[in-house]
Image (spheres, grey):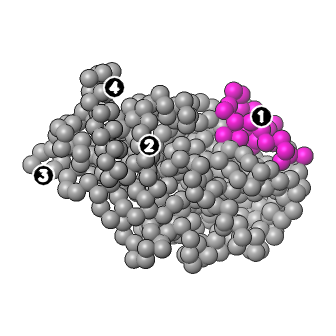
Amino acid sequence: MSKVLVISSDAMVGEDLVQYRQTSSYRRLFAGGAQVRQVRSIYPSLTLPAHVTMMTGMYPEHHGIASNTLLTPGTVPAPWHWEYGPIRCDTVFRAAKQAGRTTAAVFWPVTGSNPDIDYLLADNWPYGPGDTLEKAFRRTGTTPEVLQIVERHKAIYEHCQQKHPERDLFGIRCACDILRQFRPDLMLLHPANIDAVRHTQGIFGPHITKAVEELDDWLNALADAMEEAGVLEETNIFLVSDHGQRNFTRFVSLNVELARAGLIRLDGDGKVESWDAWCMTNGMSALIYLRDPADKALHDRVYALLQQLQQTGLYGFSRLYTTEEACREEHLGGDFSFVVETDGYTSFGDWCTGPAARPADQPDYHCGRGDHGYLPTFGPQPILLANGPDIRPGALLEQARLVDEAPTYARILGGALAGTDGRVLEELLR
């Protein structure tokens, strides 16, 4: 009856393992275990779609989450996919429950109100005046006994919900208490500090050294909690990540050109009144939605405009996909009509007025700000380290995919995720 703990260190990449292997938590938890040398992410290489893949074994064309945010043209900031409901397939939590196991998740994306998670702190934060941390967690499925843990540590988090490393420290403290108090058979945990510092300071540099040191402290805290609970020796621990990042040098919003073409209509203050086409950013890719996807004349008009913009070479995208092409070539499906892929230097925005291009804030040209959302073949790649009673010592696998992770966790727990896009990584298991 072994357990599974998955720590997804957002945007951690293979290059970071050079430093991480020198830490005490690596020696304590992963030395002598298994490794996948290169893990292929999904398209878009974006946090929420990737984490849904990591808990379902499905590509976005099947699980239904193609972006971090909901389609809400003109709303800034756009609301995020907090809730589990839109996911169109089973998760590893369902597989674990069907096998008679207990489950937990802390800040794992798109888990809000998931009935298969016994001990849940969903990845969300308070919205608007009068909202509180307790209300935000309660409405996304946190139970009273877990709210007591939130109360214990909320001083770390309640005034800095979107700041790192405070957000991550709070999550780790809560996860440690859940491990001590409830000893779940499956826990999925998502610290995002490395991703945050890459976004703000570039993909490599001293800031990454500090972030890896903080991760080391947090993993040692988790190990201490498991030792205190008496479950460390029976827990299979996975350190994984969702995507890498690339430096970029500018932002481009295609909505400026859609507005100039009369496809987005603005009021006197520049706010969206109505729209026929809308470009929603996915970082270094973007999805173009049509108000009426069945309107062939509108489809052809927007397609022609996007082709013209691409041909100029000025608007930051190197590839233009139709929905059918994105699904066939990159396993990306949804209600959008087109996808644009970065030229490697551009991240996409969604403003509608002013210049279409804006420079990224980069005090040193060697270290532009980092972003992701691009095709998973580019840039530094995600990681997978594993160790525990069901892991084959010293196993080394050259390549795997995000879709392979959830079926592997389910197998260890004695359950199954049937019909997934991924496979069980038998090479890593005893």
- Toward the viewer: 234 or 54? 54
Q: Are circles 3 and 1 on residues that touch, CB within 8 Å?
A: no
Residue type, numbered disc 2: Arg
Label 3 or label 1, whichever comes before in sequence order: 3
Name the mark on residue 415. 1
Is residue 197 toward the left or the right of residue 145 in the image?
A: left
SS under mark 3: loop
- Toward the viewer: 385 or 130? 385
Residue type, numbered disc 3: Asp
Label 1 or label 2, whichever comes before in sequence order: 2
For image coordinates 70% across by 73% down, the residue present is 19
Q: What percent of the width, then of the height, locates residue 110?
A: 52, 44
Q: Would you say residue 318 is visible in this rendering? A: yes
Name the mark on residue 269. 3
Nearest-to-viewer mark from 1 and 4: 4
The quadrant in which residue 56 appears is top right
SS under mark 1: loop
SS under mark 2: strand
Task: Give the Cα distance between marks 3 and 1.
Answer: 55 Å
Residue 401's place in the image compared with 95, above or below, is below
Task: Give the Cα distance between marks 1 and 2.
Answer: 40 Å
Q: Are circles 4 and 2 on residues that touch, CB within 8 Å?
A: no
Residues shaded magenta: 403-430
The residue indicated by pointer 4 is 293
Label 2 or label 3, whichever comes before in sequence order: 3
